[in-house]
Image (cartoon, helix red, strand yellow):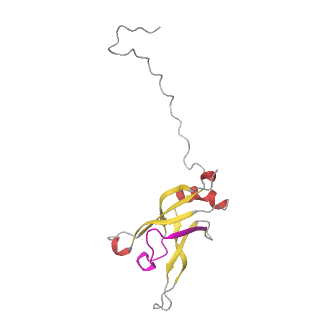
Amino acid sequence: MSDAKLPLIHKAPVEGLAIHVARTGLSIGDQARLDRLSDGRIGVFARLRKPILGLIPHHREGLVGHLGPVAEEIVAPSLAHGDELRVRIIDLVPEHLANGYPPEVYISVWGDPRHLHSSLPPIDLPPAPDPKPRSPKGLSGLRPA
């Protein structure tokens, strides 16, 4: 298999935001990384604007939030195997644009799908009915041999 990265998660919300989205300088397309937190959840880390003494511009990596249970189940095997993942901020709604709702941050995750496990149980479908053979219309002179 090649080392090309394929989408593992197209769009997943970051839950439990630990930041003020508008003040961090996050923007769409910024890089992020995933790592296990001390409580076992998967945290989302990104380069955030954190000024020194409130005046001197400074950027450093900080916790944005954590993944939800479904996204965590998809990404956990890749993290356990040490796969390199490409994580990007793909959508965000800062506080001043949230219109009374909580702010939102969404990420996409790309990686090697070899370690993916199906997160949904298989569905037992009934067998498809056999189609009846039909004679062609408008060709009455032809008969099947």
Q: Residue furthest right?
A: 81
Residue 40 pos. (x, y %): 62, 66
State whether residue 62 is above or below residue 69: below
- Decide: is 33 above or below 133: below
Q: Position of residue 14 (x, y in %)?
A: 48, 66
Choose between 54 and 135: the one closer to the eye.
135
Number of marks: 0
Report the residue at 48% width, 70% height from top: 30
Residue 97 image-quadrant placement: bottom left
- Using the image as rendered, state which of residue 89 and residue 5 is in the foreground: 5
Q: Magenta segment range? A: 17-35
Q: Quadrant of residue 98?
A: bottom left
Q: Is residue 118 left or right of residue 19?
A: right
x and y, in percent, of residue 7 in the image = 53, 55
* Image position of 145 (left or right of 80): left
Residue displayed at 39% across by 73% down: 94
Where 49 falls versus 37 (above or below)? below
Q: Is residue 31 magenta?
A: yes
Q: Position of residue 114 (x, y in %)?
A: 63, 51
Q: Residue at x 57, y 57 (%)?
A: 5
Look at the image and say whether residue 124 sits in the magenta stretch.
Answer: no
